[in-house]
């Protein structure tokens, strides 16, 4: 081994294990920055094996990406677990809301959304599985508050006439839908940032169901606002018209 190679070898050995950054400086030298900020230029031609060791010791691009995306994935998992608990609370609340509803179209909508919620729970479990996280729910205080408020609305509605009672119930349901829309939108955006297309697709399906439920609640509420001031005979006709409208706008009748 020639003298300059021995010197280069000693210099390389001195900084082994302290590498912070390494990059090609020229065609024949490699620039190395150590953890304490020192900069060294190594002869890539005279000590190729040590240079190779330095390169192999560096994190791969995929490892760097995983490290950088770690906090985002943790946040997504946290969001999904929060939504999972929210949906599980609704599995218990929706049957009670459907029972409390007076109009048949509102009952039908709430029962349909109960079935959608069951599917949404499965999608959330699947999403967590894709991310390699246990399907463990995290207590969702926000939904707990909305569910508790819904109980109060149903209790107070027992003393109200049909239209006002249903309008109050729709208001409670709309607050739930808006909460879920915000939650699913946030989770979907995080999944998109992480380039998780399968999770994005699952969350998009659930988000679409929440948005559709919100729109249908709005449509049911419109005639009820006028019904409260109408004679009973007119109220019955409005109820029938609303029921017909709901049937026409059920997913299987929309052709999409």
Image (tube, helix red, strand yellow):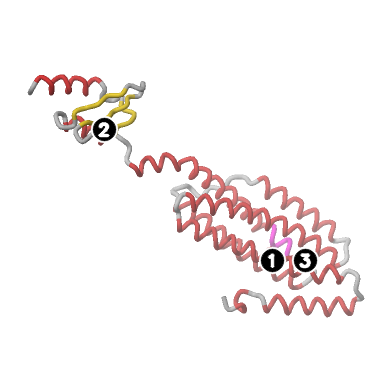
Give whichever of discs 1 and 2 has the lower sequence position.
2
Q: How many marks?
A: 3
Task: Name the residue beneath numbered marker 3.
Answer: 101
Query: Which residue is more in the foreground, 130 or 72?
Result: 72
Q: Which residues are magenta?
A: 93-98
**Who's the residue at 40% across and 42% down the image?**
66
Asked if residue 198 is positioned above or below residue 251 in the image, the reply reads above
Task: Name the residue beneath numbered marker 2.
Answer: 25
Task: Indicate the secondary structure of the residue bearing disc 2.
Answer: loop
Mark 3: give few (<14), some (14-19) or many (20+) Cα within 10 Å: many
In the picture, the quarter occupied by the N terminus is top left
Give whichever of discs 3 and 1 has the lower sequence position.
3
In the picture, the quarter occupied by the C terminus is bottom right
Q: Could you say where residue 85 lies in the image, as x and y percent from the top left?
A: 60, 50
Task: Indicate the secondary structure of the residue bearing disc 3.
Answer: loop
- Report the magenta stretch's main SS: helix
Q: Do labels 1 and 2 touch, CB within 8 Å?
A: no
Q: CA distance from mark 1 to mark 2?
A: 61 Å
**Who's the residue at 8% across and 22% down the image?**
2
Task: Name the residue beneath numbered marker 1.
Answer: 215
Q: Residue furthest left?
A: 1
Query: Left or right: where does residue 84 sit relative to residue 164?
Result: left
Quarter where residue 91 is shown? bottom right
Query: Which residue is more in the foreground, 194 or 152?
Result: 194
Marking on residue 249: none
Whether the magenta-drawn stretch holds residue 148 is answered as no
Asked if residue 212 is positioned above or below residue 40 in the image, the reply reads below
Q: CA distance from mark 3 to mark 1?
A: 17 Å
Q: Could you say where residue 242 lies in the image, as x and y percent from the top left?
A: 76, 76
Give whichever of discs 2 and 3 has the lower sequence position.
2
């Amino acid at each position: 081994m020639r003298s300059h190679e021995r010197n280069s070898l000693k210099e390389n050995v001195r900084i082994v294990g302290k590498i912070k950054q390494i990059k090609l400086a020229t065609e024949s030298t490699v620039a190395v920055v150590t953890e304490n900020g020192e900069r060294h230029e190594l002869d890539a031609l005279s000590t190729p094996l040590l240079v190779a060791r330095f390169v192999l010791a560096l994190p791969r691009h995929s490892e760097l990406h995983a490290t950088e995306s770690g906090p985002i994935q943790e946040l997504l998992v946290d969001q999904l677990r929060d939504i999972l608990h929210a949906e599980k609370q609704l599995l218990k609340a929706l049957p009670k809301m459907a029972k409390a509803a007076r109009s048949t179209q509102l009952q039908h909508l709430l029962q349909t959304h109960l079935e959608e919620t069951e599917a949404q729970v499965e999608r959330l479990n699947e999403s967590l599985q894709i991310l390699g996280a246990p399907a463990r729910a995290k207590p969702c205080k926000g939904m707990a508050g909305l569910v508790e408020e819904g109980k109060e609305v149903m209790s107070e509605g027992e003393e109200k006439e049909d239209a006002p009672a249903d309008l109050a119930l729709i208001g409670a349901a709309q607050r739930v839908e808006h909460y879920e829309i915000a939650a699913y939108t946030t989770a979907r955006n995080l999944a998109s940032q992480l380039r998780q297309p399968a999770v994005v697709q699952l969350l998009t399906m659930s988000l679409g169901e929440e948005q559709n439920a919100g729109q249908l609640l709005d449509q049911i509420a419109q005639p009820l606002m006028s019904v409260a001031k109408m004679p009973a005979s007119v109220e019955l006709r409005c109820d029938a018209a609303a029921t017909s409208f709901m049937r026409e706008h059920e997913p299987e009748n929309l052709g999409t």
